[in-house]
Amino acid sequence: MKLTVGVADMKISNRPDDILITYSLGSCIGIVVFDPVVVVGGLLHLMLPEASLSADKAAKNPYMFADTGIPLLFKDCYRLGAVKERLIVKAVGGAQVLDPNGMFNIGKRNILAMRKLFWQNGVTMGATALGGTVNRTISLEMGTGTVLLKTSGEGVVSL
């Protein structure tokens, strides 16, 4: 079953038939985690770097922010049996698409917030497709752990 992850959303699965997918990652970041031993994975589509930007929004939707959404992604996978040391972690997005003059640098700030959290928690990232000026779509096939990346104007590749 295809499970679409919306903006500021997250889905977790342990069903081999599921495909987790999120579309149009611009400055947002899509983070995929997958434990191949227990076939548990998740996909987070975060929008902004820090919950302190809007405590009200963070309380209503912690998936909107890197510093609140990323910990939930990992914790929910652990609840289904994933083990941190086995997790394959991949990230896509952080582009500069709606901010041509770089005034807000949301994409760069999202990347920095994600990398800081991973560094503080000893998380090693695998493949990434970060930065640039293009939109991307990413999916995780639960049965195989295959992560597919579609970049605007290009085809689909395995990440």
Image (cartoon, rainbow, N blue to C red):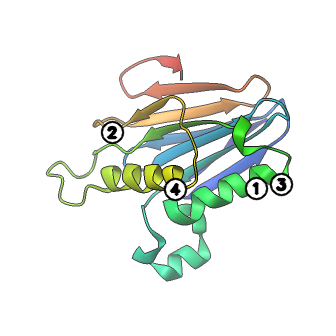
Residue in the picture at 85% in, 49% down: 80
Q: Which residue is mark 2?
A: 131
The label on residue 76 is 1
Q: Earlier in the sequence, mark 2 or mark 4?
A: 4
Query: Which of 123 and 54 lies nearest the eye of the viewer?
Result: 123
Q: Which residue is mark 3?
A: 79
Q: Is residue 144 above or below residue 92?
A: above
**Residue 58 x, y percent position in the rendering:** 54, 74
For badge 1, the amino acid type reads: Asp
Q: Earlier in the sequence, mark 4 or mark 3?
A: 3
* Front of the two marks 2 and 3: 3
Query: Which of 93 and 17 lies nearest the eye of the viewer?
Result: 93
* Contact? badges 3 and 1 (CB < 8 Å): yes
Where does the N terminus fall, quadrant-wise?
A: top right
Query: Which of 98 and 59 lies nearest the eye of the viewer?
Result: 59
**Residue 146 x, y percent position in the rendering:** 66, 23
The label on residue 120 is 4
At mark 1, the secondary structure is: helix
Q: CA distance from mark 2 to mark 4?
A: 21 Å
For badge 3, the amino acid type reads: Arg
Q: CA distance from mark 2 to mark 3?
A: 31 Å
At mark 4, the secondary structure is: helix
63 relative to 72 in the view: left or right? left
Q: Earlier in the sequence, mark 2 or mark 3?
A: 3
56 relative to 99 in the view: left or right? right
